[in-house]
Amino acid sequence: MKLYSSLLKSEIYQILYVQDVFSNYEDFLALVTKAFDPKVLFLTVIPVVAAFNTRLYSRLLLSVLLTEYFNTILKWILAEDRPFWWVRETSEFTTLNRPKLYQNELTCEPSPGNPSGHLMTSTTYLYVIFSVLEEAAVLRHGKPVVISLRVCYYFSLLLISISRMYFGCHFLHQCIFGILAGVLLTKVTMSLSFEKYLTKLTRRRRLAYCCLICLLLLGIYWGQKLFGVDPQWPVKMAFKWCDDPFFLDPNTTLVFSIVRLTGALFAFAIVGPVLKSAGLNWKRSVPLALTMMGAKWAAIYYTPRYYGVIVYYLYTFLVYLIFTYGYMRLVPAIATVVIDPRVQRNTRPKMN
């Protein structure tokens, strides 16, 4: 325990160093941490991908959903502090030498710190997208472009790590663990054998697995209560040590994350993974996906917040279920390019 506290103490000084060195780049780092927020990525990147390729959308959605679920489970099990409240609570410092970490509205996230959700989810998003880009680059441009893409990939993760440390959201080891866990889980969920296994399952069986995941999370939640641990302890710590209570966003709590993920996961289970997809007419798919994206943002903005917790969470669940189903079914149904078989026969090269 003493060794662990010493590690966190040394990482507090690392955060102070980052805050000092990058103080002139705060606006840029704020842009980075906002752009790679898991919720924002889920509401922007995935819909854009759905507009261009249903198959890629399916793979990306599955990887992200399972990664975020796994991140939630790890956060609850590990139950690690975030720097902005640990530095105020720990006995490693005294009143005379206790450092003051810089805070702003991006700092006060009311959830456990390890692993970093920003890093774990962003690792998945970028891994899937850069893998597709690498496949295309190998065929057209060779290894130099592939190397450049990988440099961009790791540099992006470095920037996200710096931004999370700068705002006092995560310790260094939480960022590193988020990256490693994200890469490991993405390789599993991206494997073709895993997708084929899900495809062979009946819809009822896939929905049963979704229910099993929900029961697991409920078991962890109530298991903590059974052992005298309040699952909402990070919310209380954030309220206690945030410079401004209005910095807190209820949408960053683990319970809210579980509700939105569950809505999307049930939609995925109803449709099933897409192993093959026809080409999309971008003149139809892009406007449709962007319209749905705007409608989803509006639906989330007008979430009923004053009618009780049940209404709030049920509404959120339905929004994510309906729109995820729409991206998987409605977009390809309206925008799929239909090729007339007679045209295909007429365009075949003649044999001499």
Image (cartoon, rainbow, N blue to C red):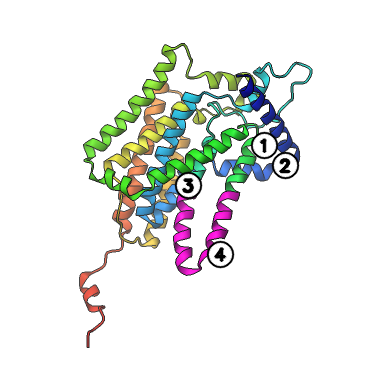
Question: Which label lies toward us, 4 or 1?
Answer: 4
Q: State the residue in front, 7 or 60.
A: 7
The amino acid type of the residue labelled 3 equals: Tyr
The amino acid type of the residue labelled 2 equals: Phe
Question: Which label lies toward us, 4 or 2?
Answer: 4
How many labels sit on residues? Answer: 4
Q: Horizontal placement of 74 versus 164: left or right? A: left
The residue wearing badge 3 is 125
Residue 94: horizontal and vertical position, in percent? 74, 16
The amino acid type of the residue labelled 4 equals: Pro
Which comes sooner in the sequence, label 4 or label 1? 4
Whether the residues at callouts 2 and 1 have beta carbons within 8 Å, the answer is yes
Which comes sooner in the sequence, label 4 or label 3? 3
Q: Give the distance between the C-alpha atoms of the residues marked 4 and 3, in whole angstroms.
A: 23 Å
> Magenta part of the protein: which range?
126-155
- Asked which secondary structure carries label 2, the reply is loop
